[in-house]
Image: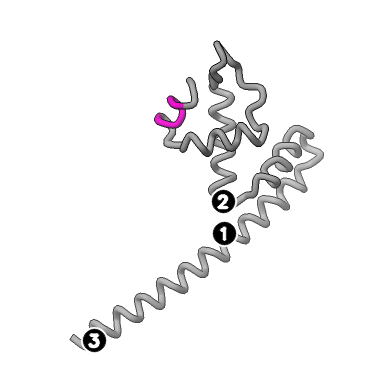
Amino acid sequence: MNINEISLTYNVPIDCIQDFENQGFFDEVKQIDGEKIYEEKDIQKLSFLMTLKNVGMSIQDMKKYIQYISEGDSTLSQRIDMLTRYRQALLEKAHTCYKSIDILDYFIYQMKTKQ
């Protein structure tokens, strides 16, 4: 698949894929007549990168995490620590969102009782 097909099929913006390319995440992608052709392993890597991006992981930490993976099981504790930090940050964001929802619910309740 080329970049346009991947973008359409997996709903990933082309500029996001290109950013990952520019950061060196897809240096090993095959090229045919100057066009990058993504194979299944590349699509799996893109999916993994999008997951990391969606949890708020920085490009720098993505690179570090992938480096840890390449180093094998000796880096399991570092990977667990990194994912745990991002998990905690997401929990804090979720907590903030739930507090905001509670406030909105209270405002709605107040207005409904005035009707």
Q: Residue at x 67, y 43 (%)?
A: 62
Vertical relation: 112 (above or below) 67: below
User: Residue at coordinates 72% horizontally, 46% vertically from top-left?
Assistant: 79
Q: Name the residue carrying label 2.
A: 55
Residue contact at pointers 2 and 1, CB within 8 angstroms: yes
Tell me: 65 left or right of 55: right
Q: Of the residues shown, which amino acid type is indicated by label 2?
A: Val
For the record, the magenta segment spans 4-8
Helix, strand or loop for disc 2: loop
**Which amino acid lies under the numbered mark 3 shown in the image of this protein?**
Thr
Q: Quadrant of residue 28?
A: top right
Quadrant of image for the C terminus = bottom left
The secondary structure that most of the magenta stretch takes on is helix
Q: In the image, is 83 to the left or to the right of 72?
A: left
Q: Are marks 2 and 3 in contact (CB under 8 Å)?
A: no
Find the distance from the CA under tag 2 to the CA under tag 1: 7 Å
Question: Looking at the rendered structure, which numbered label has been put on residue 90?
Answer: 1
Q: Which mark is residue 26?
A: none
